[in-house]
Image: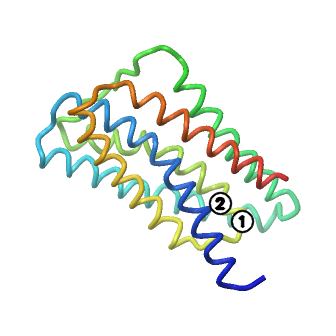
Amino acid sequence: MDISTFAWGQLITLSIIAIALGMDAFSLGLGLGMRKPTRNRTILISSFIAVFHVFMPLIGIWIGQFLSIYFHHIAVIVGGALLCFLGLQMFWSSIQNREDVLPFSDRTILGMVLIAFSVSLDSLSAGLSMGFFATDPLLTVVLCGVAGGLMSLIGLYFGRLMGSWIGKYGEVFGGIVLITLGIQFIM
């Protein structure tokens, strides 16, 4: 196999994973966008989400790489299973007919940090599973950060315009993508 083919394949796979992980940020952005935040608050929320979408998968990758040294033979299966689990969790939470109420306000810096942290937890899990594979950590975290930040920004702006109905479908799509990639890794 040509190295450039491997690099493009990895770029495409990691981009798909980053976009799937960014669906939570997009959904959250839609919900917060309906509160009509100011332009500065919108940029600040998206920036926090982008930063957490960089550091959470990075921490997960480091843990995954450490564990893969000791569990090399089962690393691929565990990584694929984690992606499937994460996708199922995203899918399940999106089809439940309940309104998620944030226990903290997006109007304070601490609240925005907690929102960014909570929406980035799935990136930690995905980073853990990617740590089991030979992925480029820098490329992974840059793609996750850019996708999370941009998708939350887009969600915040669309939330002002469209309402909440897209959020559920975006998360369903993200969950299905992660499940599909997890099954593909296991196979």
Q: Is residue 78 above or below residue 176?
A: below
- Please give the count of numbered marks on the rendered protein: 2
Q: Is residue 92 left or right of residue 46?
A: right
Residue that appears at 15% across and 37% down: 37
Q: Quadrant of residue 172?
A: top right
Residue that appears at 78% across and 68% down: 69
Residue that appears at 29% across and 26% down: 163
Percent of width and height locating residue 34: 23, 28
Q: Quadrant of residue 164?
A: top left
Q: Quadrant of residue 156?
A: top left
Q: Amino acid at mark 1?
A: Phe
Q: Observer-nearest residue: 48 or 170?
A: 170
Residue that appears at 77% across and 52% down: 184
Where is mark 1, residue-wise? 133
Q: Observer-nearest residue: 5 or 82?
A: 5
Q: Is residue 30 left or right of residue 43?
A: right
Q: Label 1, secondary structure: give it.
A: loop
Farthest residue toward the top? 97
Q: Is residue 93 above or below residue 11?
A: above
Tell me the colour scheme of the image.
rainbow
What mark, if any, has residue 130 been given in the picture?
Answer: 2
Percent of width and height locating residue 25: 39, 43
Packing grade of label 2 (10 A; few <14, some 14-19, many >=20) is many
Q: Is residue 40 above or below residue 87?
A: below
